[in-house]
Amino acid sequence: MPRDWHATARYDPATGIATAGGYVGDGLSTTNLAGRTLTDLILGRESELTALPWVNHRSPNWEPEPLRFLGANLGTTAMGIADGEERRFGRPSVVAKLMAPLTGH
């Protein structure tokens, strides 16, 4: 899972290595788009696909351990609390609203 929740389709002509990933739950449709995008990148074709913002995107690195572990687990706990808050009070969660900037939403 990328740090900024941003998928990528990347090709390095110097090494010949192509990668795609970071779909964060949208893999079924995005893999088709990634394959078509990588095809154009590998063949050196400029197209609407190669102009997409995910082409050659580099996500920031995750924080070093144990900060990543602590942050991920605290975030999971907070969102569980948010789910309970929404079930109990029937309104959008205050906890979820506070967590939104940290999750890229």
Image (spheres, rainbow, N blue to C red):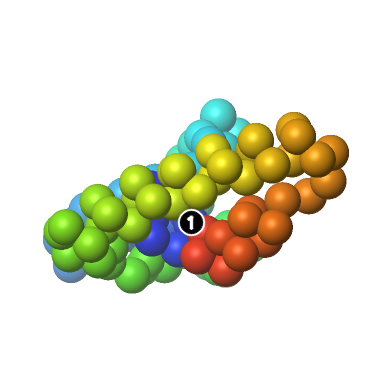
Q: Position of residue 86 (x, y in %)?
A: 74, 40
Q: Measuring 43% from the left and 56% from the top, which residue is drawn there?
A: 8
Viewport quadrant of the C terminus: bottom right
In the depicted view, which residue is nearer to us: 29 or 60? 60
**Rendered image quadrant of residue 65:** bottom left
| Residue sticking out furthest to the top | 28
Q: Amino acid at mark 1?
A: Trp
Percent from the top left, x then y, of residue 27?
51, 35
Q: How many marks?
A: 1
Relative height, residue 20 to residue 5 (above, below): above
User: Is residue 60 visible from the viewing direction of this image?
Assistant: yes
Residue 62 appears left or right of 94: left
Residue situated furthest right in the rendering: 90
Instruction: Please provide percent x and percent y for residue 57.
Output: 41, 67
Q: Residue at x 33, y 70 (%)?
A: 60
In the picture shown, does residue 28 fall above or below 1? above
Q: Residue at x 60, y 34 (%)?
A: 29
74 displayed left or right of 46: left
Give the x, y percent position of residue 18.
29, 51
Tell me if I can see residue 23 in this picture.
no
- Is 71 left or right of 78, judged from the image as shown? left
Foreground residue among 64 and 81: 81
2 in relation to 13, above or below? above
Residue ID at (56%, 60%):
99
Name the secondary structure under disc 1: loop
Task: Tell whether 18 sits left or right of 41.
Answer: left
Q: Which residue is mark 1?
A: 5
Name the one closer to the observer, 28 or 43. 28
Residue neighbourhood size for the residue with mark 1, other residues' Cα within 10 Å, grouped as few (<14), some (14–19), many (≥20): some
Front-most of residues 74 and 5: 74
